[in-house]
Image (cartoon, rainbow, N blue to C red):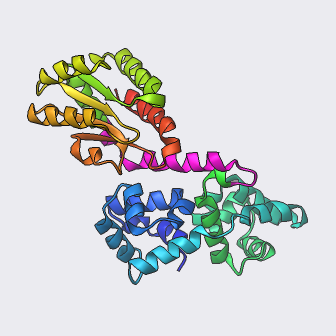
């Protein structure tokens, strides 16, 4: 059973959480191949129970069988599209039409019937079968499965890609998929409704990014204050009200000042919004959690991505 084929063809059978997991695996096949059950669930933004249920819905014996198939798919070489390009000149005129149609839209070709692909390429169904054999496939089903694997790989994984950019692409994709648009809209609404927003958080190399957060959100019309003086911060925290909001930017570990601020906010029933990785306890302590990438080198880019998405929701 081919995992990519299963996920693409059976998506209609999945519920909302299972569909979210399927999309994450298809968009991050290579990263998913290295993941444990816990990390795969966390990165996809679902619970381990959803992962267990998903394995059964997809038709696998158990979770171990499912994870094995994911790892196998992730280890497939990404050379199939290159094979089609290299053999294109040696194909017949009709088969070249098929090659061009596939290279233009591999995702369509991976899910199309033989008649649909033939219509798109303006050839006969028999030509599709001949083309499949010409590029080393057993039949049309084998062709579609190999195309599905190729189209599931991110574009940055092509030959000559810079490894750092591939890792960054994967980290930001994972961040993007951890929350759907409705959760960002809820966070934006909470910011809009707050009487005032108190911004605290990152220091050191991330300090300029806190300034960027302050500027962008202030430009969006929020009554936002960024306080860096400890004495003034303690005084401000003591005056928080339930209609205020505490916004915490925590790309790394959180210090005692942040923990104290969260404690004050909870006592005074002030909602807390945290922009941090899922691994930090702060993510579960906040009323509104906005994700940053799990990969530390990508977090400064993740802050800007989150800020863009939040500003758009505002």
Q: Is residue 82 positioned above or below 229 on the image?
A: below
Q: Position of residue 166 (x, y in %)?
A: 62, 50
Labels in figure, total: 0
Residue occupying image coordinates x 45% and y 80%: 65
- In the displayed structure image, the side of residue 250 where residue 244 appears, left or right: left
- Asked whether the viewer can see residue 5, the reply is no
Q: Is residue 62 magenta?
A: no
Q: Is residue 126 visible?
A: yes
View extreme (right): residue = 90
Image point (29%, 45%), residue name: 283
Q: Nearer the viewer, residue 44 or 297?
A: 297
* Residue 20 place in picture, x, y as percent: 39, 57
Residue 145 falls in image quadrant: bottom right
Q: Tell me: 174 left or right of 157.
A: left
- 133 in relation to 225, above or below: below
What secondary structure characterizes most of the magenta part? Answer: helix
Answer above or below: position of 251 versus 42: above
Q: Is residue 168 magenta?
A: yes
Residue 88 lies, in percent from the top left, at: 84, 62
From the image, which quarter does the C terminus lie in?
top left
| Residue at 63%, 45% in the rendered image | 165
Q: Residue at x 76, y 56 (%)?
A: 100
Identify the magenta region: 158-184
Quadrant location of residue 96?
Answer: bottom right
Q: Residue furthest bottom?
A: 61
Residue 194: percent from left, percent from top: 20, 23
- Report which quarter residue 253 is drawn in: top left
Q: Is residue 260 above or below residue 168?
A: above
User: Nearest the camera: 98 or 71?
Assistant: 71
């Amino acid at each position: 059973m081919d995992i990519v084929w299963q996920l693409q063809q059976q998506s209609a059978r999945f519920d909302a959480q299972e569909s979210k997991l399927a999309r994450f695996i298809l968009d991050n096949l290579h990263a998913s191949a290295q993941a444990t059950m816990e990390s795969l669930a966390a990165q996809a933004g679902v619970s381990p129970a959803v992962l267990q249920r998903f394995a059964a819905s997809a038709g696998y014996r158990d979770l171990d069988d499912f994870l094995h198939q994911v790892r196998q798919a992730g280890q497939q070489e990404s050379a199939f599209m290159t094979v089609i390009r290299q053999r294109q000149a040696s194909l017949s005129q009709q088969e070249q039409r098929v090659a061009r149609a596939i290279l233009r839209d591999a995702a369509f070709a991976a899910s199309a019937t033989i008649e649909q692909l033939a219509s798109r390429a303006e050839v006969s169904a028999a030509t599709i079968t001949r083309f499949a054999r010409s590029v080393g496939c057993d039949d049309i089903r084998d062709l579609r499965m190999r195309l599905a694997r190729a189209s599931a790989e991110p574009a940055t994984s092509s030959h000559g890609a810079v490894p750092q950019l591939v890792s960054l692409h994967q980290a930001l994709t994972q961040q993007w998929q951890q929350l759907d648009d409705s959760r960002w809209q809820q966070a934006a609404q909470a910011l809009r409704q707050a009487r005032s927003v108190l911004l605290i958080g990152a220091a050191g190399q991330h300090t300029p990014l806190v300034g960027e957060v302050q500027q962008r959100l202030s430009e969006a019309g929020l009554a936002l204050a960024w306080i860096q003086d400890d004495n003034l911060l303690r005084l401000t925290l003591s005056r928080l009200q339930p209609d205020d909001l505490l916004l915490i930017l925590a790309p790394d570990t959180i210090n005692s000042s942040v923990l104290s601020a969260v404690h004050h906010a909870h006592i005074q029933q002030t909602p807390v919004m945290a922009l941090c990785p899922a691994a930090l306890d702060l993510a579960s302590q906040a009323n509104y959690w906005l994700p940053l990438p799990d990969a530390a080198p990508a977090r400064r880019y993740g802050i800007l991505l989150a800020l863009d998405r939040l500003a758009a929701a505002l």
